[in-house]
Image (cartoon, rainbow, N blue to C red):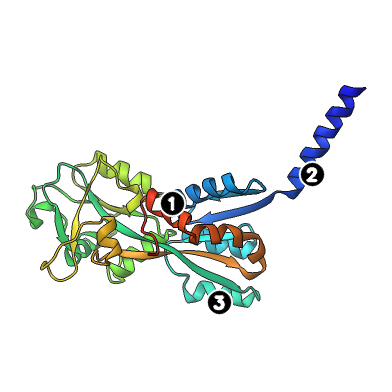
Amino acid sequence: MKTLFTLTLYLLANIFVSAQTQVVRIKGSDTMLPLSQKEAEEFMKQNKDYKVIVTGGGSVTAVNALLSGDADLGMMSRIMNAEEKLKFQQKGIKLTEIIIGFDALAVIVHPSNKIDKLTIEQVEAIFTGAIENWKDLGGDDRKIITVSRESSSGTYGFFKEHVLRDKDYAPSVLLMPNSESIVNVVSETPGAIGYVGLAYVEGKIKTIALSNDKGKNYYSPNLNNCKSHKYPVSRPLFYYYRDESEKLVKPFVQYVLSEQGQRNIQLVGYVPLQ
C-alpha cells in the first residue's frame, strides 16, 4: 500500500511538472540552426521549466510556421520581405523583428584549388554561368562545378541579391538542401565552389578571400574581418515572433541578447552584436 501511495505521488508530481513546462518551438533558417541549438541547450540548463525545440528547413519555413502557428520563434538569415509581411497583416498578426547577431557567407572551394582570392564580380560571373572553367581565373584547366542552397533558403536569397546583384543562378548550379551538403560536395569535388555560413567552415574545404573594390583589397571570411565590416558578404541574423507569443519567448530572446548568449554566438562561429 505504501509503495502504491509513493508511486501515485511520484506520477502526480511529474504530471504537475510537465504541466508547468514552457515549450518554445523554434523553426527556420538552417544557417542559424547550430546557433539556436547551442543557445537552447545553455538556456535550458539555467531554466529547468523550459523546453526549447529547434528545427531547420530554411528561412521560408520560418514564415510558414509563424503564419500557421506551428512555431513560436522564427529564424531567418535574411530580412522578411514585404510580400511575406503582408501575409501577416492580412491575418491581423503583428510581428516583432530582432537582430541577434551577424554571419558571413564564406565562398569555399576544394583544398587542391590554387585559387585563393576572387573579386565579387568574378564570383557573380561563376554562379551566373559567365565563367565556366578555372583556367579563366588563373587556375587549372578544370570545369567549375557551382553548388548552392535551395531557393527556400534565406542564404540563397541573400547571395543572389548581394553577390549576383539579383541576376539568376545558372541552370547548371547544383542545389543542396542544407549547408552540410554543400561542404560535403565541395570537399569531394576538386572543381567545385559553393558558399556557407561561417559556422560551417571546416578543415576539409578552403575559403576564398573576397574583394569588393575591383581587386584593390581582399579580405578573408573570419571573425575580425566580419566585426570590422571589411569582409564584403556579411549579413544580420533575425528572430521573428508573433506579438501574442512575447510572454512565452521573451525569456529565451533576452538570454540570447545577454552577454552570455552573445558569447555563445561567437563560440559557435558567428559574429556577436558588439
User: Does label 1 or label 3 sit earlier along the sequence?
Assistant: 3
Q: Nearer the viewer, residue 6 or 87?
A: 6
Locate residue 218, reporting x and y percent: 15, 62
Image position, residue 29 (x, y; %): 46, 56
Q: Is residue 111 above or below residue 213?
A: above
Circles 2 and 3, Cβ within 8 Å, touching? The answer is: no
SS at mark 2? helix
Q: Could you say which quadrant of the image residue 68 lies in? A: bottom right
Q: Is residue 94 above or below residue 261?
A: below
Residue at x 85% of width, y 28% of height: 6
Identity of the residue drawn at 60% across and 53% down: 25
Helix, strand or loop status at disc 1: helix
Instruction: Judge the density around disc 3: few (<14), some (14-19), many (≥20) Cα neighbours within 10 Å.
Output: few
Residue 246 occupies which quadrant of the picture? bottom right
N-terminal of the two: label 1 or label 2? 2
In the rendering, which numbered label is found on residue 264? 1
User: Can residue 23 be seen by looking at this rendering?
Assistant: yes
Circle 1/circle 2 CB separation < 8 Å? no
Question: Hey, which residue is sitting farthest front in the picture?
Answer: 259
Q: Residue tagged by mark 2?
A: 16
Q: CA distance from mark 1 to mark 2?
A: 32 Å
Residue 10 location, x and y as percent?
80, 33
Q: Which of pointers 2 and 3 lies earlier in the amino acid sequence? A: 2
Q: Mark 1: give few (<14), some (14-19) or many (20+) Cα within 10 Å.
A: many
Please give the residue where the numbered disc 3 appears in the rendered image: 86
Q: Quadrant of the N terminus?
A: top right
Quick one: SS at disc 3? Answer: helix
Between 109 and 256, which is closer to the camera in this rendering? 256
Residue at 48% x, 47% y is 38
